[in-house]
Image: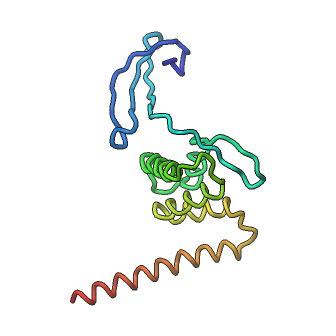
Amino acid sequence: MRCPYCAHAESDVVDTRKLDDGSSIRRRRRCPQCGRRFTTYERVETVSITVVKKNGEREPYNRDKLTRGILTACYRRPVSAQRIEQLVNDIESELLMSSEHEVSSAHVGDVTMRLLREVDEVAYIRFASVYLSFADITHLRRAVDELLLRDHASLLKHRETDESRS
């Protein structure tokens, strides 16, 4: 593995750890040339997915692009890097389960929004505002109202369950 600091062609593995129930491996490496340490990740290369955009253009699925979008939505939110990594893994798993080699960008966005909503509601609203291209404050307010209604319904259901146990 090439050192990202001095570009030396080789590095020594210092530590190896399995992540995500063994689906990926984190390696700490040390460059024998400059002595600096860096981290690499290994994961099984999945079946290639092609994303079909709204205009009909096709492009290969890009994990980094999805991760950047989620990181932007989660900026300054209490969402750990590990949780974001797990979220991206969950989205990929769902996309791969469809057994289709082509998925629409709308499907990728819908899956991302659904799973991000469970992680952090503010990040969900941020992502939705870009993904759904909120034209004005009315669209934003509608999305927030939907979240509030869902939370209110969930609270009422929880209270009913508690009262029936009493």
Q: Is residue 9 rendered to the left or right of residue 56?
A: left
The total number of labels drawn is 0
Q: Nearer the viewer, residue 105 or 3?
A: 105
Residue 63 image offset from top left, x and y in percent: 57, 42
Residue at the image point whose x is 54% and y is 54% from the top = 74
Residue at the image point whose x is 56% and y is 52% from the top = 70
Residue at the image point whose x is 30% and y is 84% from the top = 161
Residue 47 image offset from top left, x and y in percent: 53, 39
Q: Nearer the viewer, residue 76 or 159?
A: 159
Q: Is residue 151 rendered to the left or right of residue 135?
A: left
Q: Is residue 31 rendered to the left or right of residue 72?
A: left
Name, please, the residue furthest toward the top. Answer: 33
Q: Nearer the viewer, residue 82 or 87?
A: 87
Name, please, the residue furthest toward the front. Answer: 99
> In the image, is residue 109 above or below residue 3?
below
Residue 69 image offset from top left, x and y in percent: 60, 50
Q: Nearer the viewer, residue 58 or 115?
A: 58
Residue 21 image offset from top left, x and y in percent: 33, 43
Image quarter (top left, top right, bottom left or bottom right) of the C terminus: bottom left
> In the image, is residue 134 above or below residue 65?
below
> What colour-coding does the image apply?
rainbow
Name, please, the residue furthest toward the left. Answer: 166
Q: Is residue 55 rendered to the left or right of residue 36?
A: right
